[in-house]
Image: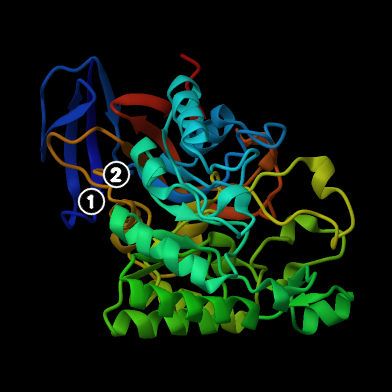
Amino acid sequence: MKLLIKNGRVIDPATKIDKVQDILIHNKKIVNIQSEINEEADKVINAKGYWVVPGLIDLHVHLRDPGFQHKESIKTGCESAAKGGFTTICCMPNTKPVTDTVEVVEYINEKSKKEGIVNVVPIGSITKSQTGEELVEIDEMVKAGICAISEDGKTVIKSNLLKEAMKQAKTCEIPVFSHCEDTDLVQGGAMNEGKRSKELGIKGIGNDSEDVIIARDIILARNTGVKLHICHVSTKGGVELIREAKVRGENISAEVCPHHFTLTDEVVERGFTNAKMNPPLRNTKDVEAIKQGLKDGTIGIIATDHAPHSKDEKDTEFHKAPFGIVGLETALPLGITELVETGLLSPIEFIKKMTINPAKIIGIEKGSLGVGKYADITIIDPNLEYEIDSNNFASKSKNSPFHNRKVKGKALYTIVSGKVVVEDGELKTK
């Protein structure tokens, strides 16, 4: 089947292209990109007024499968990703059983091929069962297909164990994704520590719990030479530590989630558990530091930390509710609204943080448009204004603090290896 995309504003940060072009797709791959293509095609998409970009890549997704399919499944998680414009997602290992063996990696790979409509790349845990006591067989899991190791949801507190994991990851040429949280400093906190937590009488989580682990992991990565990726940065201090490490030329990258550049802890209410995530929503100074980090390149990745939970699980007292919100279907519009429309980032700078930059972190041949490459493409209407409706999410879970929020920008078409899986903003049933 030949697919022709006409008249779209092609934005490809990898090649620094930002101009109106046509793209021809045949046999899963891009076969031609020119200012005008008049060749016959089985399907033509008129993308006039739209952005045509490499398929978006999310390095940080919780698919909850195996073990927690009441929250999400590989099928529904991939559908949610596709609706959000993502063509490749990396799934975190805090499943049940934990993604700590070749067998679990193979389960995810096989199920993704059968049920997933986007590319799924597993991330392995650092320790067995995520207990922080014994390393997994990293080399064997790399052979099975993991792209990184992470204890996400937890932190490896034993520095000697993490250092050895970093050494092995360096040998295997994969990055370490670091969830930075000193649990001794958290001590049961449920939201950001500050004025708002005192007003609500909710135990707070200080910035220091994140910052001290970021500092430690930077030091360990420097000494081992591993590629270190800091997950979901939320603090001003964290941004500063990462900026200083990058100035020194260290092999470090960082991601931020849309909720951390969009919301502050002022939105937290005792009954509003969809505002509970880990790390928590911080204060205005932290949000401004994150935005500056995005602008100056300190933070090169936008990821969702898509963390689905059922309504029953979230419908409880704030301190008892699980951490996490869904994010796959809101990341793109929040980024356009908060970063592009405000002038903080140009369209090409924004798209770079969701395509080629994450692709480079995990070393995959994706995130760019070019003749001969697999046709993973997202077509975006950057001017479409609407209110987010979590009831319409493809995800099984609806735990979002952005329900009814007015935004701008939507993925209209998501194309994976030349196959249109989302058309006019809706999943294709056939």
Element assignment for label 1: strand
Determine which residue is flagged by label 1: 12
Q: Quadrant of the N terminus?
A: top left
Instruction: Quadrant for residue 73, please give it.
Output: top right
| Residue 168 left/right relative to 98 | left
Element assignment for label 2: strand
* Whether residue 380 is visible: no
189 up-or-down from 423: above or below:
below
| Residue 413 left/right relative to 61 | left
* Residue 350: percent from left, percent from top: 36, 60
Tell me which amino acid carries mark 1. Asp
Name the one closer to the observer, 291 or 234.
234
Local crowd at mark 2 within 10 Å, few (<14), some, or many (≥20)? many
* Whether residue 168 is visible: yes
| Residue 303 left/right relative to 226 | right
238 up-or-down from 348: above or below:
below
Name the one closer to the observer, 254 or 371.
254
Q: Residue at x 34, y 39 (%)?
A: 143
Determine which residue is flagged by label 2: 54
Which comes sooner in the sequence, label 1 or label 2? 1
* Residue 286: percent from left, percent from top: 57, 80
| Residue 2 left/right relative to 38 | right
- Residue 295 has which mark? none
Q: Residue at x 67, y 32 (%)?
A: 69
Would you say the residues marked 1 and 2 are in contact, meaning their CB atoms lie under 8 Å apart? yes
- What is the spatial separation of the Cα atoms under label 1 and label 2, in whole angstroms? 7 Å
* Residue 124: percent from left, percent from top: 48, 47
Instruction: Quadrant for residue 320, please give it.
Output: bottom right
